[in-house]
Amino acid sequence: MVLAPVLYLALFAATPPLPPGKGKAIVQRSCKGCHALKVVTAKRATKDQWKVLVDQMINRGAEVEDEEFDTLLAYLSKNFGPVKNPPAATKAHSGLHP
């Protein structure tokens, strides 16, 4: 019994909160019915990739109204777009000159 609240808090803390935005409520309502929100927050995809994924989820039963689709797509692609490559590491100066 003592462990249950601790485990619940650990699971809750492991899922980062959704960023604010117009599509947040749609994600909370439509996505978490089938899987944890961590599935969404861990995914990084381009707008086109999100479109395919959202279409697949709708075909599997996610309840997203037609007029919500563009809002959801914009929210996901803005907040969970591809990770940009980190700046190239500065080459260590070897001390040798060409």
Image: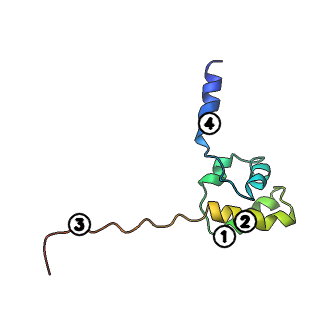
Q: Which of 61 and 94 is in front in this view?
A: 94
Q: Mark 1 points at which residue?
A: 47
Question: Which label was assigned to residue 39?
Answer: none
* Neighbour tally class for label 4: few under 14, some 14-19, many 20 plus, Cα within 10 Å: few
Residue tagged 2? 73
The quadrant in which the C terminus is found is: bottom left
Query: CA–CA distance between discs 3 and 4?
Result: 42 Å
Q: Which SS class for mark 2?
A: helix
- Pointers 2 and 3 in contact (CB under 8 A)? no
Mark 2 touches mark 1? (CB < 8 Å):
yes
Q: Are marks 1 and 4 in contact (CB under 8 Å)?
A: no
Q: Which of marks 1 and 3 is nearer the N terminus?
A: 1
**Residue 72 placement (x, y as % from top left):** 75, 62
SS of the residue at dot 1?
helix
The residues bearing labels 4 and 2 have C-alpha atoms spaced at a distance of 27 Å
Q: Vertically, is 15 above or below 78? A: above
Out of 53 and 30, give the one closest to the viewer: 30
Q: Which type of secondary structure does the marked residue at label 4 adopt?
A: helix
Label 2 sits on what residue type?
A: Leu
Mark 3 or 4, closer to the camera: 3
Q: Quadrant of the N terminus?
A: top right
Q: Residue at x 50, y 66 (%)?
A: 84
In the rendered image, which residue does mark 3 sit on? 92
Kindly indicate the quadrant of the structure image that contains residue 86.
bottom left
Q: Distance between the residues labelled 1 and 3?
A: 37 Å
* C-alpha span from label 1 to label 4: 29 Å
| Amino acid identity at mark 4 | Leu
Residue denoted by label 4: 11
Q: Residues within 10 Å of mark 3 (few under 14, many from 20)?
A: few
Amino acid on which the number 3 mark rests in the picture: Ala
